Image (cartoon, coloured by chain):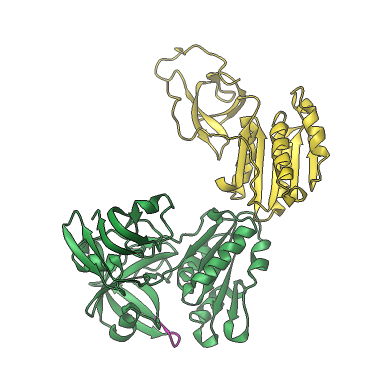
Chain colours: A yellow, B green
Amino acid sequence: MLVTGIKSKPVYAPLRADPRGRYHLMLGLGAGEVALLRVLREMQAAALDGLARTRVLLIPAPAAGDAGTAEAWREIEGLPLQEVRAFSDVAALLGEFKSLLEDSLMGTRLYVAGPESFIGLAMKIALEFNLNKDEIRAEELGSLARRVYCIHCRTTAENVRTNIVRCPGCERWLLVRDHYSRRLAAYMGVMADAEAPGELPAIKDVFV
Amino acid sequence: MSEEQTLAVEVSAIERLTPLIKHFTLAPVGGGSMPAFSGGSHIVVVMRGGARVHRNPYSLLSSPLELDAYHIGVRRMEESRGGSHFMHDQVTVGTRLEIAHPVNLFALDKIARKHVLIAGGIGITPFLAQLEDLHQGRAPYELHYCVRSPEHAAFLPRLREREGERVHVYYDSEGQAIDFERLLSGQPLGTHVYVCGPAGMIDRVTAMAQSWGWPDSHIHWEQFSAPPVGDAFDVYLARSKMHVHVPPDQSLMESIEAAGVEVPYLCRGGVCGFCQTRVLELDGEIVHNDHYLSEADRGKFMMPCVSRARCKSLVLDL
């Protein structure tokens, strides 16, 4: 298959606090708040004074449709943070994130926890502010559904769970590759039956 | 670097800018234009004057858009090992020199949102070319330039004319100094800082930026210093089957070159990693003076451009 061993496929790691950071900006979606809580507790336990310079923006689990992690959200709200704000949708959270970046100073670290599509959208904005790898940490939690960019018509399909997807723009059948663009925050989708029209591999749920 | 890879140039003008700094214009022998370069690049000038061959790196200070000649600024060092005195005392208009092709180890980050440039003394030179690049771009920038006294402020009229309010000058003689904490604690996200000057200045800028949370990828520095002196020692080059003596005031690389063996190099300052050489046998210790090798690699390799040895015997894979 075309899709293995591609270097651009992002690799994530469990979030850890970065004690070298001066300011901390954390974004969470759904189950991601569990990872953020873990980092915040780590900062508290290390008696770092970073909590007072930490802002958290998140979409709590119930609002994100995840059950069982509302506890984490309540605990985060109780911490002595600079700011913690809950949002009900991704666009509003990312809008606020972007305006915070406008006023942020060098020394800021970004932490993102949630599904990959959410991480990708946050990183795409961070990239516009020239945040480098060593300023961003991300932990993947939740759905593996992908954003898929049609390389033929440039439409992006959201929430793709299958190996083959029909492009919402040009209706070609696309093979979802591991080839990832940080700039577009999407995986590349390439016409799957270009050589033999109509001949497609079995369509399966693979990104769940 | 082999002889074939050098460029032949002729000194077409020399201008004394300050009591210690001369500006040399290097034009291609036989006309034509010089190879393109980007702001922050340096060349290595090969000086075949006296008993020894010197190879010193100098930043290119003219606009990367003007390639009819290269321009370098040379400060006369008090403790010169010969290179800067050769340039100041023996080179005249018409002198032919060999130079190595430009290399950039101090490049601007092309997608930075802001650039903060900090120069100390002759460290202004790479910024002169970078400013020409920054002039073309949209990102804001500022230059902070420290010099001993007004008479030592090379290139200041050109900077004031071109850059106006973006240039901040500090004179040691008047007790002025950059407040690094103030400068580095309030910069917007996506700022890059670049520093070129004395080692102490580079250390202070780096430490202050790090203490305010700047990651290393946003901190850029360059320093061309003479290779450190030390005890004399002897080395055996295993592949060339040759014994080489390294005197106290000559670097290992220079001694190897004088024996006729070529060592690949770019910076000759312990930064670029090009001359990394495997140590095959050692009875004694390596004095590592580079900024390149990791602790783990220091057991197996050395950088002959700046590092030396205190040893009974040393065998290198050269």
Q: Could you say where residue A200 lies in the image, as x and y percent from the top left?
A: 47, 13
Query: Is residue B266 visible in the rendered structure shown here?
Result: no
The secondary structure that dominates the magenta segment is loop
**What residue sits 65% from the left and 49% below the top?**
A19
Is A160 left, or right, of B62 in this rendering?
A: right
Quarter occupied by the C terminus of chain A: top right
Where are the magenta residues, as a range? B17-22
**What residue sits 60% from the left and 49% below the top?**
A131
Q: Could you say where residue B99 lies in the image, as x and y percent from the top left?
A: 29, 69
Name the quadrant containing residue B180: bottom right
In the image, is residue B257 part of the stretch drawn in magenta? Answer: no
Name the quadrant containing residue B66: bottom left
Asked whether B196 or B160 is in front, the reply is: B196
Q: Could you say where residue B96 lies in the image, as x and y percent from the top left?
A: 24, 77
Asked whether B54 or B241 is in front, the reply is: B241
Q: Is residue B148 placed above or below B72 in the rendered structure? A: below
Asked whether B41 or A23 is in front, the reply is: A23
Q: Is residue A43 placed above or below B177 in the rendered structure? A: above
**What residue sits 64% from the left and 56% below the top?**
A106
Asked whether B92 or B213 is in front, the reply is: B213
In the image, is residue B18 part of the stretch drawn in magenta? Answer: yes
